[in-house]
Image (spheres, rainbow, N blue to C red):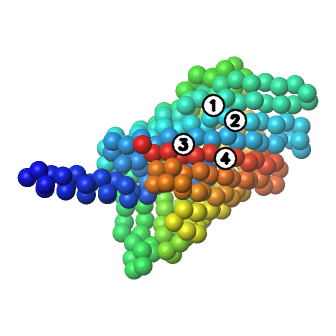
Amino acid sequence: MRRAAALLFLLAAAARAQEPLITDRPDFTESAETVPPGRFQLEAGVTHERVGEGDVDLTTFGEALLRIGVAERLELRVGLPSFGRVEFGGDSLSGWTDGSLGVKWKLAALPAGRGGRGGLDLALLAGTSAPSGDNDFTSDAWEPEVKLAAATTLTERAGLSGNLGWARAAAFDERFDRYSGSLALGLTWSDRLGSYFEVFGFDGEEPFEGSSSFANSGFTWLLSDDLQLDLRVGTGLGDSEPEWFVGAGFGARF
């Protein structure tokens, strides 16, 4: 009996070790996967943005998202406040941004066909920001948001994913509906190295800017089964701001 129990324990541990590490960064598109029950996943990084033809620089430190597997296909998501610094015309502002709280529920996982191609994964994300930031970096309002995430496999080394979202946002003491969409192509170059190319955008009743769209690309480097580094660079399309942005970060599972 002891040998059988030990064998079952080892098999369970091996299965856990083989679970792929799938993060929701560095791209804008959220994955359709949830963190396994009983596990934690911390994703964080830093982003630098250039706005208004070099007039404004914004750097955000932290971007921390704690994902907690609470049940099969269900995770809790805690977005920790980031520290932001804005530099403009020789002056600067700095402070903490709003945090957030949400959940992700995997709705379906339709099986793939021959060679692992096809199939469809669907997930629903729901949450809200919390007006906890400093005066210059808070919206001063709860901003609820829902998002549908979908993903499919194109080949053994390529996959396609996308999001459709809605948020009740706030700015300048006004509330407005904001819609978002994204499409990302993910590529696997080796057991450790991956990359992606993505386009995403926003549209709605935003008081200070209408629609905006962006393109970005990046790399992920898996250091171990539970630790990944990432790097990204992107640009605004047309008159969208920021003009460009770069970022780096990590995802760690424990």
Q: Do the residues labelled 4 and 2 touch (CB within 8 Å)?
A: no
Question: How crowded is the residue under tag 4: few (<14 C-alpha within 10 Å), some, or many (20+)?
Answer: some
Q: Are marks 2 and 1 in contact (CB under 8 Å)?
A: yes
Disc 4 on helix, strand or loop?
Answer: strand
Give amino acid for label 2.
Thr
Give amino acid for label 4.
Ala
- Real-space CA distance between mark 2 and mark 3, rounded to the nearest whole angstrom: 14 Å
Q: Quadrant of residue 173?
A: top right
- Farthest bottom residue in view: 114
- Is residue 24 visible in the rendered structure shown here? no
For disc 4, the marked residue is 248
- Farthest top residue in view: 135
Q: Position of residue 124 (x, y in %)?
A: 44, 49
| Mark 1 or mark 4: whose residue is earlier in sequence | 1
Residue located at (62% from left, 62% from top): 195
Q: Position of residue 97 (x, y in %)?
A: 64, 28
Q: Is residue 76 left or right of residue 162?
A: left
For disc 3, the marked residue is 43
| Mark 2 or mark 3: whose residue is earlier in sequence | 3
Residue located at (82% from left, 43% from top): 50
